[in-house]
Amino acid sequence: MISQKLAEIQKAIPANVCLVAVSKTKPVSDLLEAYQAGQRHFGENKVQEMTEKWEVLPKDIQWHLIGHLQTNKVKYIAPYVHLIHSVDSLKLLAEINKQGAKNQRVISVLLQFYIAKEETKFGLDFEEAVELLTSDTFKSFNNIHVVGVMGMASFTDDESVVRAEFSQLKAIFTRLKNSFFQNDDSFKEISMGMSGDYQLAIEQGSTMVRVGSSIFGGR
């Protein structure tokens, strides 16, 4: 039962942590069951799938784009997306800003950092983020709002590795907060932790966990 699993996870996480139900590849009926159980934050990896679901589901759902985002796809989600977790370049930010302006919206985003040992993960390193945030281009954007950071830990059973990676992301968040966002109260999100490691992530300071299989079952 989806509603039962949701209730168990909600009970296990602190009230200040946002649970994003990762609903990629799941049918609309599953999302509706979660919605009826009170879930409002849903995460999708693919723009097309998210848009198809957005069109048919209740409009008070807050949609999180958590997968890698190509610039040519931004226009499809700009009218409604709640938060884009996976921003890893100035080029992508520029496109989000442009589409935000077209839709008369300020779009909230997270900067994605590369913290894992695997070569396949996307993301910035700290120096790249500083370069991005100090650029004149970034300072000219009026239709995006950077509200925090996101990262994915290595896919491993070694908890010490995962804990260290989450701790690294928390440290990056703190450095950025102190250097660039000291007076911005909305720069407060640390999106880290998935079905297998969200408890560890919360221990390390996560404010947003992205949980799929523990709610909806495996694919």
Image (spheres, rainbow, N blue to C red):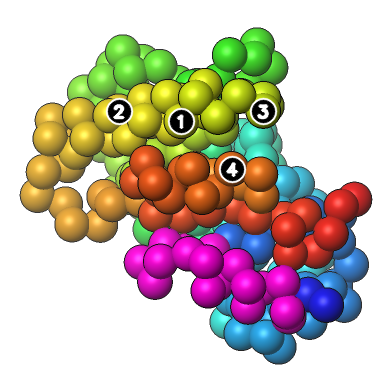
Q: Which portion, as a residue range, is magenta? A: 3-19
Q: Is residue 169 above or below residue 210?
A: above
Examine the rendering and report whether any part of residue 67 can be seen: yes
Type of amino acid under label 4: Asp
1 or 2: mark nearer the eye: 1
Q: Earlier in the sequence, mark 1 or mark 2?
A: 1
In this picture, residue 180 sits left or right of residue 218: left
Q: Residue at x 40, y 66 (%)?
A: 14
* Amino acid residing under circle 2: Ile
Q: Residues within 10 Å of mark 1 (few under 14, many from 20)?
A: some
Q: Disc 3 marks which amino acid?
A: Asp
The residues tagged by marks 3 and 2 sit, at their Cα atoms, a distance apart of 24 Å
Q: Are marks 4 and 3 in contact (CB under 8 Å)?
A: no
User: How many angstroms separate mark 1 from mark 2 (CA)?
Assistant: 14 Å
Residue at image location 33% in from the left, 18% down from the top: 126
Helix, strand or loop at label 4? It is: loop
Say whether residue 172 is left or right of residue 3. Answer: left
Residue 16 coordinates in the image, percent (x, y)? 36, 66
Outermost residue, bottom direction? Answer: 36
Q: Amino acid at mark 1?
A: Arg
